[in-house]
Amino acid sequence: MKTFKSIIALFMMVFIPFGFMLWYRNHQSTGFATIELILYPLLFGGSSILLLYAIKKHFLKEELSDFNSGKGSIAKDILWGFMLTAMYFILFYIERATLSNILTFKSNHELLHLMLDMRKSPLLLILWFGPVLWIGIALYEELIRVFMLTSFWKFSNNTYWIIFSILITAIIIGLAHWSQGSYGVVTIAIKSLVSGYFFYKIRRILPLVIAHVLYDGIQVALLLITYPQ
């Protein structure tokens, strides 16, 4: 019964929402406003976090402690977060040097211009680099990653199953970025392998969130600073 509930929870929190996101990104109309870069992640990510909490506590009868069961401290989490960020950027440059000429990347010019429009509004910049990036993007995506991993690991503690779980989670997260083309799918899946293995060894979610914020935030900040006016 517990296994069946875990499967239902995975469909509710991962497979159905990810399938909807893929469909939506492939069929969305143009003409979005910049404010949607703020509202959509906050509304979708924030509501998903609340739903995840409700499912864990009331449906699965579990606490959120398995998301952060490893020993550590805030200081160590921050240090691990910076180290993980460095690993992400190392992979970023390796991937760009080796895979960019093999795989295709789908650039979203409309999204690019919407993000550049944020330069005109300090309030939008504060909102995006604050609650949107920390909660609507990083915390939401890392909670989903950890939820998948811990859910899969409850089925078996066999080493091969654990490795397979890390692999299948990375593939699912990579495919969720299908709108970025094969380059986005593969490179995000590779970084997700690193994230999955890191969580398996450390069992602390905060370093994953910090690394996600820094990795995305630094790239967006550089884009906004260096892109011609």
Image (cartoon, helix red, strand yellow):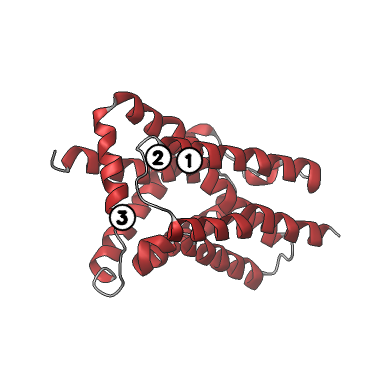
Residue positioned 80% across, 62% down in the render: 4
Considering only order in the chain, which callout, 2 or 3, is on the residue closer to the N terminus? 2
Q: Is residue 146 left or right of residue 218?
A: right
Q: CA distance from mark 3 to mark 1?
A: 17 Å
Residue positioned 35% across, 37% down in the render: 34
Whether label 3 touches label 2, CB < 8 Å: no
Residue hosting label 2: 37
Residue 167: x, y in percent? 54, 68
Image disc number at residue 40: 1
Residue positioned 42% across, 39% down in the render: 36
Considering only order in the chain, which callout, 1 or 3, is on the residue closer to the N terminus? 1
User: Which residue is more in the foreground, 194 or 186?
Assistant: 186
Relative vertical location of residue 59 with respect to residue 167 in this rendering, above or below: above
Residue hosting label 3: 108
Q: CA distance from mark 1 to mark 2?
A: 6 Å
- What secondary structure is found at the residue carrying circle 3? loop
Whether residue 77 appears in this view of the structure is no
Mark 3, other Cα within 10 Å: few <14 / some 14–19 / many ≥20: few
Whether label 3 touches label 1, CB < 8 Å: no
Mark 2, other Cα within 10 Å: few <14 / some 14–19 / many ≥20: some
Q: Is residue 36 left or right of residue 160?
A: left
Query: Which quarter of the image is occupied by the C terminus?
Result: top left
Name the kind of residue labelled 1 in the image: Tyr
Relative vertical location of residue 104 with respect to residue 93 in this rendering, above or below: below
Whether label 1 touches label 2, CB < 8 Å: yes
Residue 8: x, y in percent? 74, 58
Residue 9: x, y in percent? 72, 54
Q: In this view, which residue lies farthest toward the right?
A: 1
Residue 42: x, y in percent? 50, 36
